[in-house]
Image (tube, helix red, strand yellow):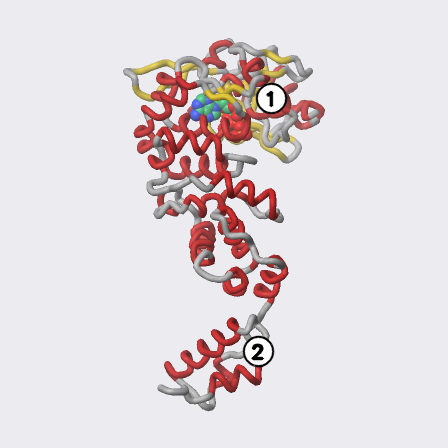
Amino acid sequence: PFLDDPALKQVLAALSAEGAQALIVGGAVRNALLGEPVADVDIATSARPGETLRLAETAGLRTVPTGIDHGTITVIAGGRGFEVTSFRRDVETFGRRAVVAYSDRIEEDAQRRDFTMNAIYATSTGEVLDPVGGLEDLARRRLRFVGDPHDRISEDYLRILRFFRFLAWYGREAELQAVAACGELREGLARISRERIGYEIRRLLNAPDPSPSVALMTETGVLTQVLPGADASDLPELVEAEHEYGTGALTAWPRRLALLAPPDAAEALRLSRDETRTQDQIAQALTMPAPVAAYHFGRAVAAQSVLIRAARGETPPFGWCHRLARGAEAKFPLTARDLMPQLSGPALGQALRRAEAAYIDSDFTLPREALLQIALQPEAGS
Ligand code: ATP
Ligand code: MG
């Protein structure tokens, strides 16, 4: 169905106008075959980058040289970007990271891709080309490296995390040999940038049920390699709780990451300021009653904490959803200004905090008058 996309057709037609091959590859083909939604479309072509630029421009399409060093040009059509990468083969240099050379053959291009299910190609008319047996693996939901796992990981250690990410999303079977290689080579992940690690971990944790894959990461030591101190033992229960109690429209990974509770996650994954704050707030929410968390941090953060607690065996109290809403909507009716004539300085702050604590304790029911009295009454006993 995504082949009917006129913008995609336009790009493929432009690239093949002078006889070059232009094929869809990667996630789009894999997901279409699985009946899963297709996000972005990657294109592989026998045209060299310079030719790609020329062919696109001849067809009146704008280009952005996003990764021209490794042969990738983004071609814009219908307001969207298509990543066009020239067929490549990897040339090894002294056992270090592979260097790029271009190729005319999809057989060679397929060899440099990570997994067989990611190396299935499709023409603009929907014909499927399968140079490394990806179709059969896909049908069995078997995640298999193209070539020897040990060699392929040694070329690019990020592939360890891609392995667990694709396993979580599309795999049922993992080759033992591949899992073992991921474990043996895990320390190579220290060479990968934290941004790229963070990207993979977010996507991994957003899988419908990442727990079997994450369990393998725990077993092989890969999890603690990237997130020291993380404990995924309650992850299956969290996924169950999500099904039982619902998640609204909340994204899964922040809650799942908070459950793993790795101490330096924000650093290790280069979380953004907002993402870091959410992690901190969920951690704090876990130390207080959920409606109070909703009052302080809003309903979404409180709901995450309810699910995490459910995963740890605490049944949410009856009517929790409603109580969260009440907490989130409650508004403490006093401000400093209300106490200003009578109080000032530290005493003012203390009085406000005392009144707010009473307000929270009353389940957000004490009216303004009662709160004023609490704030202004001389402290009994001290
Ligand atoms: P999604 O877009 O859903 O993340 P994808 O398979 O399209 O999945 P991309 O990261 O978009 O993944 O990469 C596109 C294709 O490029 C992959 O399918 C794979 O063939 C190849 N590829 C990407 N990263 C690597 C890598 N680190 N090593 C080898 N091949 C890779
Ligand atoms: Mg993709």
Left or right position of 179 against 331: left
- Give the position of the N terminus as an image quadrant: top right
Of tags 2 and 1, which is closer to the observer? 2
Q: Secondary structure at mark 1?
A: helix
The mark tally for this picture is: 2
Residue 211, placed above or below residue 338: above
Residue 80 position, x and y percent, is 62, 34
Residue 76 position, x and y percent, is 60, 31
Left or right position of 53 against 190: right
Residue 29 position, x and y percent, is 60, 21
Tell me if the residue at label 2 has its CB under 8 Å from ligand 1.
no
How many C-alpha atoms fall within 10 Å of the one at disc 2: few (<14), some, or many (≥20)?
Answer: some
Query: Residue sitting at 51 percent across and 30 percent down?
Result: 168
Q: Nearer the viewer, residue 218 or 333?
A: 218
Question: Residue flagged by tag 1: what amino acid is it?
Answer: Val
Q: Nearer the viewer, residue 40 or 225?
A: 225
Q: Which residue is mark 1?
A: 29
Q: Secondary structure at mark 2?
A: loop
Q: Which residue is mark 2?
A: 366
- Give the position of the C terminus as an image quadrant: bottom left
Residue 255, placed above or below residue 353: above
Residue 108 position, x and y percent, is 47, 10
Between discs 2 and 1, the one toward the N terminus: 1
Query: Residue sitting at 52 percent across and 71 percent down?
Result: 360
Residue 211, placed above or below residue 376: above
- Residues under labels 2 and 1: Cα distance? 60 Å
Residue 73 visible? The answer is no
How many C-alpha atoms fall within 10 Å of the one at disc 1: few (<14), some, or many (≥20)?
Answer: many
